Image (spheres, rainbow, N blue to C red):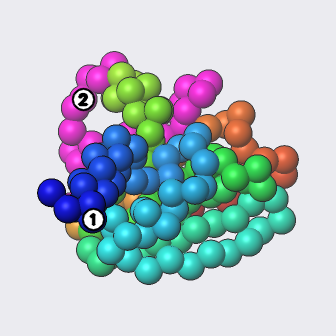
């Protein structure tokens, strides 16, 4: 194997070991990777105490990642014809989300709205086939002056 081939193989292994998304509670360093993963275009909008990175995926789904001035993703929101990969978006909070959905007696998000209100995680998912909307945030990570309604 050539040196270049070996380096490429190492990069593939490393990329598989780390999530491609800037997951909830994580840092903003991987937002560009999200854009590439979604094959989308990204725009950025600064607010007083946070920045919104909006990625328009090739599939038509729009994902917004809310990043504090400290560089932490405190909220995510989406809308579009397809649900995003929630495991990727929620990162370390996915297990908590999954357990909460199971405790509500359901397994498939597409069949009913999801409303989770826990101390460390709030999730709202609704819509219908080809028309999904949702948001998730970590209440204690909201920057000062930011309301839950700001995450859309």
Mark identifier at residue 106: 2
Q: Residues within 10 Å of mark 2 (few under 14, many from 20)?
A: few
Q: Quadrant of the N terminus?
A: bottom left
Towards the viewer: 101 or 18: 18
| Residue 115, visible in the rendered structure | no
- Determine the residue positioned at 34% across, 41% down: 17
Q: Position of residue 48 (x, y in %)?
A: 83, 65
Q: Position of residue 12 (x, y in %)?
A: 27, 53
The kind of secondary structure element at disc 2 is loop
Mark identifier at residue 4: 1
- Give the magenta range: 102-129
Label 1 vs label 2: CA separation?
Answer: 48 Å
Q: Earlier in the sequence, mark 1 or mark 2?
A: 1
Please tell me in which quadrant of the rendered image residue 133 appears.
bottom left
Towards the viewer: 57 or 1: 1
Q: Looking at the image, is 133 positioned above or below residue 110? A: below
Q: Quadrant of the C terminus?
A: bottom right
Q: Position of residue 99 (x, y in %)?
A: 36, 22
Q: Position of residue 107 (x, y in %)?
A: 22, 32
Q: Residues within 10 Å of mark 1 (few under 14, many from 20)?
A: few
Please tell me in which quadrant of the rendered image residue 79 appears.
bottom left
Q: Do the CB atoms of the residues marked 1 and 2 lie less than 8 Å apart?
A: no
Mark identifier at residue 108: none
């Amino acid at each position: 194997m050539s040196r270049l081939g070996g380096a490429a193989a190492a990069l593939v292994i490393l990329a598989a070991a780390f999530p491609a998304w800037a997951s909830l509670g994580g840092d903003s360093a991987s937002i560009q990777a999200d854009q590439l993963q979604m094959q989308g275009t990204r725009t950025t909008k600064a607010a007083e105490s946070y920045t919104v990175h909006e990625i328009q995926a090739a599939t038509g789904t729009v994902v917004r990642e809310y990043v504090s001035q400290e560089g932490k993703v405190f909220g995510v929101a989406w809308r579009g014809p397809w649900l995003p990969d929630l495991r990727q978006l929620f990162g370390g909070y996915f297990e908590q989300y999954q357990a909460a959905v199971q405790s509500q007696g359901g397994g498939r998000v597409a069949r009913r709205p999801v409303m989770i209100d826990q101390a460390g995680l709030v999730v709202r998912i609704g819509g219908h086939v080809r028309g999904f909307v949702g948001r998730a945030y970590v209440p204690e990570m909201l920057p000062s002056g930011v309301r839950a309604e700001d995450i859309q």
